[in-house]
Image: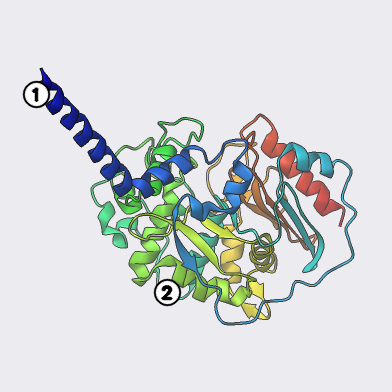
Amino acid sequence: MRVVLKWAMRVVLMALLASVVIGLWKREEILRLWAVNTLFDEGRIVTNFSHMDRAFLTVPVGRGEGPVSDLPKGSALTLPEGVADWIEARAVPSLMVLHQGRVVHESYHLGTGPEDRRISWSLAKSYLSALFGILVEDGTIASLDAPVTDYAPQLIGGAYDGVTLRQVLQMTSGVAFDEEYLDYHSDINRMGRVLALGGTMDGFAAGLMARAAQPGDLWDYVSIDTHVLGMVVRGATGRDIPGLLTEKIIAPLGLEAAAYYLSDGEGVAFVLGGLNMRTRDYARFGLMYEQMGMYGGRQVVPSDWVRLSTRASAPTLPGKMGYGYQWWIPVGAPDGVFMARGIYGQYIYIDQDRDAVIVVTGADRGFRGDGVHEENVAMMRRIAAAL
């Protein structure tokens, strides 16, 4: 009996030792997975959104060697009635308004400040669109009607085989992808766990085999489409996107601070939603688009691309928001009103006729509620109209 107990104790001790060894070996992955699973918790979301590098692998986006570009102060804007209540109800950490290139309102809330580098979520898609337009203009990408597999051969044989660049830009790829953020088992959340655990995003995209529609037939917001655009950019240039973005867009804007992307385990930037930068630096990008791609006397993004990419060209349903090339167009908006948009309440809202740029960062756990987005757009329209 004693011999049996002795061996049983040895087995238990060996199992405990193995657990400790495995725990230490996988400690970083376990911590990242825990951070992802608590990323949106009520008591953590605001802080998490300002410190995403604590939960994910990252790659730097340099700001370049030039000076910080000036964002001069303008006459203080008297905000419309109800803005303070909206900021509280929608958990808005920062709000910034530019008029005629001048800062007329800048405020920070919920314990955040101007030096926080806030997660973009899908605002990042519009940055990639800008980079794409530059590569089309200089001939690096020959045609929007070329198949994505011309530049990303890893996608041959999967759901993206036969899909064109234009279709991916417009979110009409037809690829089946469940974008339900509140479903643990959805494709978007499976993708998030791949990212958190250091997996490969290229492999994830190549592994998608099912289609919900034929390419070009149906508009469906599918975030993995933007990762495929990133694969195309990398294939066309042989370079990583953070370096290209710095050279082509970030350096000319003269940001206040270096940015960073979340990345997968291969160091590939999470271009569909992983950009992190200061609110004032998001505003610089918005101002460049408001000025038809011009910033500081330099044409950063071709004006034709700004016009084309921010026009409602995708086959969205009547009465719903329009979509261009990774940019949104609000319902009933006149020409020159468009926006970048991200989950949990991130916006860069541009009204060219009013010479207005509005940046909203959000941590709104109720962002999917009925009428919430419409309420946000209505508030930004009221702010623009008050200028």
Query: Could you tell me the amino acid type at mark 1?
Result: Val
Does 184 sit left or right of 296 as displayed? left
Query: Could you tell me the amino acid type at mark 2?
Result: Gly
- Would you name the residue on which mark 1 appears? 3
Mark 1 and mark 2 lie on one chain; the one further toward the N terminus is: 1
- Would you name the residue on which mark 2 appears? 139
* Color style of the picture: rainbow
- Residue 287: image quadrant is bottom right
The quadrant in which the N terminus is found is top left
| x 55%, y 50%: residue | 121
Which mark identifies residue 190?
Answer: none
Residue 2 image position (x, y, % from top left): 12, 21
Does 317 sit left or right of 225 as displayed? right
The quadrant in which the C terminus is found is bottom right
How many dots with numbers? 2
From this view, report whether residue 272 is shown above or below residue 2: below
Mark 2, Cα crowd under 10 Å, few <14 / some 14-19 / many 20+, is few
**Spatial distance from mark 1 to mark 2, Cα to Cα?**
78 Å
From this view, report whether residue 103 is shown above or below residue 296: above
| x 38%, y 60%: residue | 268
From this view, report whether residue 185 is shown above or below residue 360: above
| x 57%, y 47%: residue | 48
Residue 55 image position (x, y, % from top left): 47, 49
